[in-house]
Amino acid sequence: MEKRPRPWAQLSAGRSPRGAAWRFAAIVGGLVATSVISVACGGGGSADANPDSPPDQDMLDDGQSTGPVLATANGEFLFRPDSKMTEAATLDRVAGGTALALAWNPSEAKTALRPGMKVLFFGRATQCDNSRQGPLDSFDDARLLDVAQRTGMAAQAVPATLRWTPVGTVDRCTGEAPWLGGDAAAFLSPDDEHGGVALLTTTGAREDGSKPFFDTFTADGQDGAGTNNYLQVGIVSFRMNPSATTALKPWAGGKPARVQSTQTLGTATVEGGNGQLVQAKQQIGLSFLNRQCFAERRSSPCQLQYILTTAIVRRGVQDWSEVGWFRRANVLFDPVQGGIAVMDGRIGTSGTDTVDAEHRLPLWSSQGSATQHGTFSARTFDVTISFEQFQNALKIIAARKHGVPLASVDAARMVEFWGGGWNDTSQWVLLSTDVGQEVYNPDTAFRAELGGGFRHLYVGQQ
């Protein structure tokens, strides 16, 4: 069987993989992303309503959205860097937060779980205690130009406070590590026309052969048991307050939920080295929470996460139409997060649905760019999820959890797992959304990296 690296499921909620599940339950529990309507077929619930697009259809993708103008009058979430974001302090109240969170391997609840914007990195820092949260710091102009070139993102008048890279500290690291920094990086360009957020996820030996300060986790993973081994992740996350009266209800009023992001990929390096599997991904994450389920204090996680792949490259893969697991979405249950379900899959060309691998039920629809397999500039990924498609996901998850055929999942089983509000659009709220990058690289001598970014991120209604 083909080896497949475990996707970074934790991206969807913007939380630290280690210990995230119990923290989420304790904090959120205590407080209390779609279908073009399927341009071609209405985004219904029957199997194979709109099959996967044939491989040659990807050649017709121009990278533009075919959907309507974004709705912004009903509390939708829209993050678009502009000239007003001139200092880090201007980001403190994004997504209802009180302070911008910056960290590598975040382990403190106030960093990972409080509402607001977060710039986070996950990986192994040289000669440091990686079980403890580390800080990010700025970098100089020469490094800024290098990161801009590698990510393909404009760096217009980026102040020092809007540049971030993992660094060592005296209390967490030994040897010379407290004075080291890099190599992963991010910056926000505060420009009305070309602004955006850049992310550089870089692993393995540097160009001069030296070892990086910040690299992938080893074979032992982040927890010593192999979880997230050989992975490094960079993420810009926006966590909401699900109990707020203004919480976004994407399906309220019967409209489909919608997520849109214009993204760029300037570097995607996976070929070379000693032949081991190397893979890199850029993706959009979404997490939805059912408030009634939490209020009923059910043992189930009461939330569903999505990972929508905007770009994926893998050593040795040239024709992704021949990669079976990639063609359809997969359902994962993340043990690190207490069994939270994750719908992980590609985005098709405009007018097509992505279906699940087992039942061929449509889960989301595209009205923009399809998933890419190389570098690109300013492509708009635009996905809708009708409530019927969302219910398909809920039923698939319930069937897997109950260990029964999908046809046996009736209303009683849905209530048992998702609570009495499972089919109530007013109970489902947006918990978080993010844009992230991950690199899987077990070859420490090989430089594998992904450099990209996004101009905007939107979650709302169609």
Image (cartoon, rainbow, N blue to C red):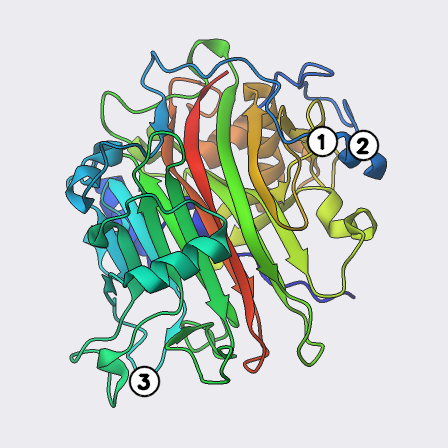
Give the spatial CA distance, label 2 vs label 1. Answer: 7 Å
* In the rendered image, the vertical position of residue 11 relative to residue 35, given as above or below: below
Q: Secondary structure at mark 1?
A: loop
Would you say the residues marked 1 and 3 are in contact, meaning their CB atoms lie under 8 Å apart? no
Q: Nearer the viewer, mark 3 or mark 2?
A: 2
If you read the primary sequence from the N terminus, does the residue marked by circle 1 or circle 3 appear first?
Answer: 1
- At a point 77% along the width and 22% down the height, the residue shown is 49
Q: Which residue is mark 1?
A: 61
On the image, the x and y values in percent for residue 283 come to 53, 46
Q: How dense is the environment of label 3, judged by Cα within 10 Å: few (below 14), some, or many (20 and up)?
A: some
Amino acid tagged 1: Asp
On the image, the x and y values in percent for residue 271 come to 68, 68
Q: Nearer the viewer, residue 393 or 284?
A: 284
Quadrant location of the N terminus in the rendered image: bottom right
User: Is residue 113 among the parts visible in the rendering?
Assistant: yes
- At a point 37% along the width and 37% down the height, the residue shown is 195
On the image, the x and y values in percent for residue 37 come to 62, 16
Would you say the residues marked 2 and 1 are in contact, meaning their CB atoms lie under 8 Å apart? yes
Amino acid tagged 3: Gln
**Relative side of 27 to 263, left or right:** left
Q: Which residue is mark 3?
A: 127
Q: Total of numbered circles in the picture?
A: 3
Q: Which residue is mark 2?
A: 57
